[in-house]
Image: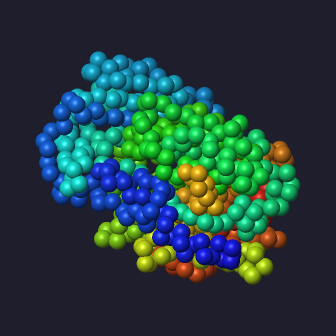
Amino acid sequence: MNPRFALVIVLALAACAPSTSPTSSPPRQAANVPHPLASPQPSLATAIRSATPLGPSGAATTVSLTFALKIRNPERLAAIIASGRTVTPEAYATEFGVDPAQVQAAVADLARSGFQASWRPGSSLIAADGPAPLAAALLQVDIESYRLADGTTFYATLDQPRFQQPLASVAASVSGLDNYRRGRSLAVRRGGLTPADVLTFYNLQPLRQAGLDGTGQTIVLPEIDDLPNLTDLNKFAAEFNLPPFDSLLTVKRDVNWGTPEKPQGETALDLEIIHEVAPNAKLVIYLSAPDFAHGDRAFDQLVTDHLGSIISESLGSCESDTPSGHRNTYAAIEDRALAQGMSHFVASGDSGAWTCGEDQDPSGSFPSTLPTVTTVGATTLFESVQGVYFKERAWGSPLDETGTGGGPSQFYAIPDYQKNVAQAAGHGQRQVPDVAADGDPATGYHIVFNGKDGQIGGTSASTPLWAATVALINQDLKKRGLRQVGFANPALYWMGANQSTFPSKPFHDVTTGNNLLFDAGTGWDFATGWGSMDAAALDAAWILYIKGGGP
């Protein structure tokens, strides 16, 4: 720990951390002022049992439904993704998309039924907003309203939806049947590592000295808390002699995506950490409401627009309580992203192995448990007396029950790229995280929010660090006439298995600490995956991987 901010940390942990909103619609939350990390929220079933029933939801309650379209030739799509090959959006629509005429027929039928329904060519979704009674009749479910003890209300159904024609011909799943369960962002705050520290500790400086600064790269980010102006971002840039954000940042909004939360610091955190590593990379944020249906719409548009090939996502929800409609919808959009060559980094969560709460079984955070994303965990960073990298340990803090997310998925089987590191505790399921980086708030990053300098941690911090590092690697690969990273996991696991053959190892193997359940150890583990990056060595290894045609 650098002596220059050791005292600040002691004060910071009591003074600056994410707030917990007393709404009935958890769990997507962002860094703010005083409070420890938000505790995992009760499941929907638990909330319903403790709530006061208000009866069937009336016409004044608007339900936002998002229907995921079916995919043709799913086995071929899976083979393309596994091979690392990519297709154009036009080729994807031709080979894997639903007949547009059928989609338009379903949209027209929804409109005749009283919904505001829409679909855009290239999209994987139909959006349909309408009164709760219409939604209940359409999907043959009972949608009820409830009031929690704090006075907030929500609507929900525990029934399984059923599709009728012509919707049944094109729709695979639906999200939006409750407004209780939401994703959460994953962060805490105050003091810390400067851009110079980050470049030094993770050996990013050689890449920057080689002229790699993110030029020609664009990183896209789904976000749920607003960014009202550039003041905080440009104050951060000025403090560290970085380019201003004005010409680099694009903010995307759409009434169809709902209203984002008020600024809470998450969006500022993501953008500032990326900017310190890849200061000339363009940044595009897609702002949505924090519920699943609206988030799915924004994510679908993010992939359809494909303004950049790297996605950084610091959002997640308890996997076991995430409705299957949302999981299936999101997974289908993600498949399209990978098939079109996008890299997607997702935070593993900040509640250790207990994303759903320590009164529940261990659980991961969705979408980090998807086999098609690269999941980023968090470490505690230690530096030497010379002020350079010394070691890391898995971030786990039993006193406040926070730590890096990690463990087996409850829904997704272990992918081929991970079978060589299959753990007995994984029970044949997808294992997370894949990689890690500093995220302990006690050794966190310097940011600016609400005009004030602070320190921040969480897997919301380690995830944009990895996304920005890959932006530099993509820039280098492009200069060399090589294909860009795309789906990162096959390469990362190849590097992990072959570390001893490289002149410099691409990962710092984290072998101590735990995430409140799983211990870090030699090689891949449930606490930190392969560990954190040595960026220069990672870049060199990626060049070898691509020149060699992959494993």
Seen at 82% across and 71% down, the residue is 503
Side of 450 relative to 115 (left or right): right
Q: From where the camera sits, is residue 229 visible? A: yes
Above/below status of 510 relative to 469? below
The quadrant in which the N terminus is found is bottom right
* x, y percent for residue 24: 29, 51
Above/below status of 30 relative to 259? below
Side of 59 relative to 332 (left or right): left
Residue that protrudes farthest toward the front in the picture: 451
Q: From where the camera sits, is residue 487 visible? A: no
Side of 512 relative to 262 (left or right): right
* x, y percent for residue 368: 49, 57
**Which of 469/172 is in front?**
469
Residue that protrudes farthest toward the right in the picture: 210
Seen at 34% across and 34% down, the residue is 64
Seen at 43% across and 30% down, the residue is 256
Above/below status of 169 relative to 308? above
* x, y percent for residue 54: 14, 44
* x, y percent for residue 545: 75, 57
The quadrant in which the C terminus is found is bottom right
Above/below status of 163 relative to 337? above
